[in-house]
Amino acid sequence: MVFSLFNRKEKHDSRRAREALLARTADSRPGPDADTLAAQREAARRTEEKINQIESEMIAAAAVARASAEPAPANPATATRPQAPAPVQPARSAAGFDPATAVLGDQADAMAIDVNRSALPNVLEEAAILYSNGQAQPASLALRQALADPGLGTWQSLAWLMLLDLYQALGERPAFESLALEYAARFESSPPGWSELLVAPASAARPAGPNGSAAVEFAACLDASVAAQVDSIIAASARRRETIVDFGKVEALDAAAAEALLRLLAQFGQGQAGLVVRGAEALFTAARGAIEPGRRDPSEAAWMLALQALRVLGRQQAFEDLSIEYCVTYEVSPPSWEPIGAAIRAGEATSQVAAATPSRPAGEADAFPLRGDVLGRMQAELPALRAHAASRSTVVVDCRGLRRMEFVAAGDLLNEVVALRGAGKQVQFVEPNYLVYALMLVMGIQELAEIRRRRI
């Protein structure tokens, strides 16, 4: 990572620009209030101060190291002019080993690497923040106007790539293909291809099928925000004979999410409408990962959800084993096995989920995945990231399946990167889409972590 002793004024100017940008975009966000805007400004100020502090410490450490490594000259006549220090390169082992390449494949070396400070134009900052806060149409308008702006200079290609990714996120394939042709003519190079991975579902529920069923997919990391999705499913169930819920993507959840999902299962267990649970194995794995035998958490919801998932799967022996662990942990009688009930049954994961999941080259288990829309305070993702990083000196974050990250989530992610760097770890973000990439530049994440851009 490259730092400069002479960019302090630029950093303070950048902070003022970011705060002004938040004020300008506030009116276009849905239902803003002064407290939320003030909190975002304060978060931006605190994270900027943390960046400055980390940078100052690294500069001071480098200066001390250089001073101790340079022997004093024998006399002024024979003293040689000191050489400028070489730029610091992304961390590799002595053998030239790059963790991201090992984890995600040889194509990582072909990606552009941005580790220097950003001077992102205001229009691109504004578009990135608008999209991050769910304002896709205003972001699209800003980017459309930016395409013909000669003042963007070398940043103009990024405006095109951001708009192409935005069309994919909105599922607007005709607009994407038309702009892709314009991109090829404008830059005389191949445009990005269409990727279903970046396409967000139009709504939480897919259209009802001929038998009155509707499929609802859940995100990779679940927190308290899933309660609204559960409420929507329960409200719509009165109009359908059967609802399909798909947990095939779920990788982590917290106690608040577990409580909401238990309420969902209880509602269908006592109602007339049917519920098909797809990806019940993934749901069990996520719930099991949130608990630990002998650790008495304030909420038992994750334990109960893991047991309910085993009921859905019909795995009585596993249920009884886990119930004994629950009994020992909380010093209560173990729950007894009961079938889940006729209204709820297990189903296989959808083919859409398999198509939306990035292919996993050998060794990708060493990368931490961020997928779908990362919203709110990252209450499920950050604990999982910390656990993943605990035994690693280089933390590789796979962003290929990440569609959108809210501004407040990006602030939390920046704070986490600061903590990881403070612990002596290197952090690499691999192939975020260009809207998320621009938001990372707005937040200054590239000053503390390596960002490997997606190949065209």
Image (spheres, rainbow, N blue to C red):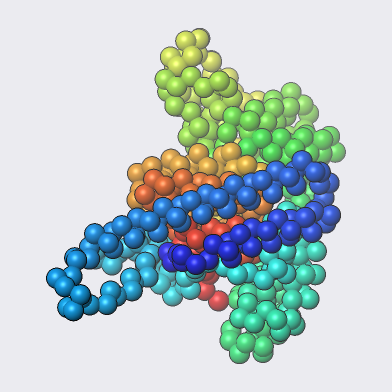
Compare residues 62 and 198 and report the one nearer the observer.
62
What residue lies at 53% left-to-right and 15% top-to-bottom?
336
Q: Is residue 440 in sight in this rendering?
A: no
**Which percent across, then down, holds residue 311?**
56, 27
Position of the C terminus by quadrant = bottom right
For the image shown, how many numbered marks are present on the structure? Answer: 0
Compare residues 90 and 378 and report the one nearer the observer.
90
Compare residues 147 and 174 and report the one nearer the observer.
147
**Which percent across, then down, holds residue 416?**
51, 46
Position of the N terminus by quadrant = bottom left
As drawn, 281 above or below 305: below
What residue lies at 61% left-to-right and 59% top-to-bottom?
12
What residue lies at 38% left-to-right and 51% top-to-bottom?
425
Compare residues 403 and 113 and report the one nearer the observer.
113
Task: Specify the quadrant of the image occupied by residue 379.
Answer: top right
As drawn, 302 above or below 239: above
Q: Is residue 143 in sight in this rendering?
A: yes
Q: Outermost residue toward the left? A: 74
**Which percent across, then down, holds residue 134?**
75, 55
Left of 311 or right of it: where is 60? left
What residue lies at 70% left-to-right and 68% top-to-bottom?
122
**Which percent across, then down, holds residue 30?**
82, 50
